[in-house]
Image: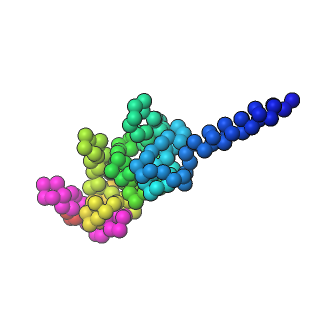
Amino acid sequence: MAPPPRLALLLLLLTLALAACSKKVGDACKIGTRVCQSKDMMLVCDTGHFAAEPCKGPNGCIEPPYTAPPICDFSGDKAGDACFDDRQKVLCTPDETAKISCYKDKLVIEPCRGPGGCMQLDNGVRCNRFVAREGDVCLEDSEGLYACDEEKKAALECKMGKYIKVKACRESCEVDVTQNNLVICR
């Protein structure tokens, strides 16, 4: 038996109203607005239209019980996933072997292969990049800096976003922290 016409119309209008209230990717928005679209997705407004930002960490997207903006746990996100707030997105991977940061709207994972790896500090992170592999990612803040390879047989330099081998060492490669992190190839 079909519902009476008035009830059917009311249900239709209610469904349309609820659909109109839910925000989605591409909708117009006020810049700076953030909302949880689901447990693992936050909508971010940085350009006047909502964009999706994954929140793949164990806490997902959390709507605080007060008027603060939602919090996105991106600790489980992968390199290349979308991100939109360069200032808030710097942390260590759970195993403390790499730094996760937001760079040009994409998550970047930089290996921290030196002693101490990646350490979460009160004011950010410290990533020991004195040891690297050829091809490891390095950002602009590391451009021109040197590292030793893991076997301590070559000097590497950060150029155009990747570490490249610039010199083979006969005996060993060392980083002298007492001399402004000078890489010494013997």
In the visual, does 106 lie left or right of 37?
Answer: left
Inspect the magenta stretch and tell me whether residue 24 lies in it: no
Rendered position, 100 above or below 38: below
Measuring 51% from the left and 43% from the top, which residue is drawn there? 41
Residue 86: image location, x then y, percent:
36, 53
Residue sitting at x 51%, y 53%: 28
Q: Nearer the viewer, residue 81 or 66?
A: 66
Q: Colour scheme used in the picture?
A: rainbow
Picture coordinates of residue 67, whole percent (x, y): 39, 35
Does 128 sit left or right of 179 as displayed?
right
Q: Residue 161: within the magenta? A: yes
Q: Compared to 26, does 160 lie above or below?
A: below
Q: Position of residue 64 (x, y in %)?
A: 42, 33
Q: Quadrant of residue 166?
A: bottom left
Which residue appears farthest toward the right when viewing the image?
Answer: 1
Q: The C terminus lies in which quarter of the figure?
A: bottom left
Residue in the picture at 72% in, 39% down: 12
Q: Which residues are magenta?
A: 158-183
Above or below residue 133? Residue 58 is: above
Q: What number of labels is visible?
A: 0
Q: In the rendered image of this protein, does residue 132 appear above or below residue 75?
A: below
Look at the image and tell me whether residue 81 can be seen.
no
Q: Is 186 in front, or is 121?
A: 121
Q: Nearer the viewer, residue 22 or 110?
A: 22
Instruction: Tell me which corner region of the image, top left, top right, bottom left or bottom right, holds residue 143.
Output: bottom left
Residue at the left extreme, as displayed: 178
Q: Residue at x 81, y 31 (%)?
A: 4
Q: Is residue 12 visible?
A: yes
Counting from the top left corner in percent of width and height, residue 109 is at 40, 53
Q: Quadrant of the N terminus?
A: top right
Q: Is 120 left or right of 34, judged from the image as shown?
A: left
Q: Residue furthest front?
A: 6
